[in-house]
Image: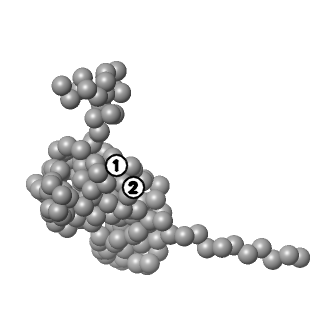
Amino acid sequence: MQKRTQEPKEKLLEELVIDVKSVVKVNKGGRQRRYSAIVVVGDRKGKVGLGIGKANEVPDAIKKAIQDANKKLITIPLIDGRTVAHEAIGHAGAARVIIKPAAAGTGVIAGGSVRAILELAGIRDVVSKSLGARTKLNMATAALNALKSIKTVEQVAALRGKSVEEILG
């Protein structure tokens, strides 16, 4: 019998745990404790994903969240490899996130889970403002929704069936 050796795959995506919290469910027999994890994965080149995992142990919850985030990867068009194309507003629950492009050298001006998503997406110059609720999951989801809505000039021109020059005026 020949042994097959598998070379370990290179990790292309970075992972960042945003939140791990204990969740309690009350049953007839007493309290049942589980753990919920929120994880962001990204390649710092325009791909980012957000995942949630629940399990009886913290490491298992994180593992599940990473798998979920890898399934939900989205691609963001980056301008000059550093910022977003235009202002965007994302909603999730009561949370609202505004993301605006910024000049070179500005850095990532964002807080909490929004900052984690923008950094792992590879956006280096951006200004963001969080409005409404402050729950980590809703803020992260709102930031992802804002990033999903961003389109480049070329994409808008293709959608409208016009040239880039006609769009820009």
Q: Residue at x 39, y 69 (%)?
A: 15
Question: Between 17 and 156, which is closer to the camera in this rendering?
Answer: 156
Question: Between 88 and 124, which is closer to the camera in this rendering?
Answer: 124
Position of residue 145 relative to residue 40, above or below, is above
Q: Amino acid at mark 1?
A: Ile
Residue 69 appearing in the image: yes
Quarter placement of the N terminus: bottom right
Q: Secondary structure at mark 2?
A: strand
In the image, is 101 to the left or to the right of 162? left
The residue that disc 1 covers is 76
The residue that disc 2 covers is 47
Quarter placement of the C terminus: top left
The CA span between labels 2 and 1 is: 6 Å
Locate residue 157, reporting x and y percent.
31, 27
The answer to whether the residue labelled 2 contacts the one labelled 1, judged by CB atoms less than 8 Å apart, is yes
Q: Residue at x 31, y 21 (%)?
A: 162
